[in-house]
Image (cartoon, helix red, strand yellow):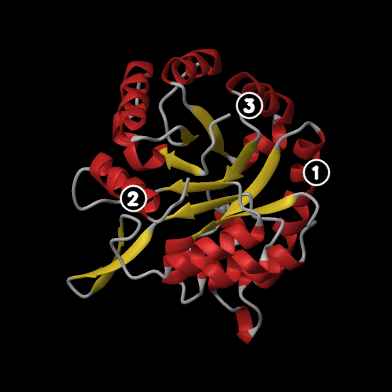
Amino acid sequence: MPQTKIGAQLYTVREFTKTPADIAKTISKLRKIGYEAVQASATGPIDPKELRKILDNEGVVCAATHRGFDQMKNEPDKVVEEHEIIGCKHTAIGGLPHNYRTSAETYREFAAEASQVAKTLLAKGLTWSYHNHSFELERFNGGRPALEILYAESDPKCFFAEIDTYWITHGGGDPAAWIRRMKGRVPLVHFKDMVVHEGKPIMAPVGAGNLNWAEILKACADAGTEWYLVEQDTCLGDPFEALKQSFENLRSWGVK
């Protein structure tokens, strides 16, 4: 197990992970930057045993994955088995299925249903987390933010959070405050920055934008976050360079 909290979210370089050969080249390139961990997401088809071999050859671990909610619900044993093969103990849902996004009640329904899925996975040694965007900060009929409904009305023993710093900010929230709110329930945090470009907020490498990283890092430490996963959904330039800049900035702040 590497002595680091920093991982690279492969979604950032998804154009370079479409085949097993691509994945091997990409993992090697990320290792040369300094990353010792990745989050497996949005890759092309690859046998878990082959992925594990690639990771082991580069001295990289799989910190977490993203999987579809239907697969988690309908094939939990298969999901657990594949994670055991790649040596990964965390998975997350990349986004809320659209049919649950319509009202406070549908968010409550998802909180209950996902809690059962998460409980099943946790009993088999795999943690389940919810990855937010900004739409969950909508307040239906002037009530609580929908994200608060998810966290408040789910089972805190198994329904965990993968807070995304950019998307919380995009929705008008404070990522450090949300991380602290989920203390003990936030094993994964997506690190991405926000900068204004041509009058619009866009994603940027960590440290290149306007987020308060001193507070975010302190909140993560206070909350017991295990993995700081660097992600940038869209990049103005080379996504590998963006991941490199984020890594170097985190290291310069003393993050191991």
- Residue 208 visible within the image: yes
Q: Which mark is residue 100?
A: none
Please name the residue shown 62% across and 70% down the image: 146
Give the Cα distance between marks 3 and 2.
27 Å
Please name the residue shown 36% across and 29% down the image: 31
Find numbered disc 2 in the image and state the secondary structure of the residue it sits on.
helix
- Which of disc 2 and disc 3 is earlier in sequence? 3
* Quarter where residue 98 is shown: bottom right
In this view of the protein, which residue sits in the foreground, 142 or 93? Answer: 93
In this view of the protein, which residue sits in the foreground, 128 or 101? Answer: 128
Q: Is residue 172 above or below residue 24?
A: below
How dense is the environment of label 2, judged by Cα within 10 Å: few (below 14), some, or many (20 and up)?
Answer: many
How dense is the environment of label 1, judged by Cα within 10 Å: few (below 14), some, or many (20 and up)?
Answer: some
Find numbered disc 3 in the image and state the secondary structure of the residue it sits on.
helix
* Total numbered badges shown on the rendered structure: 3
**Residue highlighted by disc 2:** 246
**Residue highlighted by disc 1:** 119
Find numbered disc 1 in the image and state the secondary structure of the residue it sits on.
helix
Q: Where in the figure is residue 57, as x and y percent of width and height? A: 44, 15
**Residue highlighted by disc 3:** 83
Query: What amino acid type should be assigned to the residue bearing mark 3?
Result: His
Query: What amino acid type should be assigned to the residue bearing mark 1?
Result: Lys
Q: Is residue 40 above or below residue 145?
A: above
Q: Where in the figure is residue 187, as x and y percent of width and height? A: 63, 49
Q: Residue furthest bottom?
A: 142
Q: Where in the figure is residue 88, as x and y percent of width and height? A: 61, 30
Query: What amino acid type should be assigned to the residue bearing mark 2?
Result: Ser
232 to the left or right of 130? left
- Which of disc 3 and disc 1 is earlier in sequence? 3
Locate the N terminus by quadrant.
top right
Give the Cα distance between marks 1 and 3.
16 Å
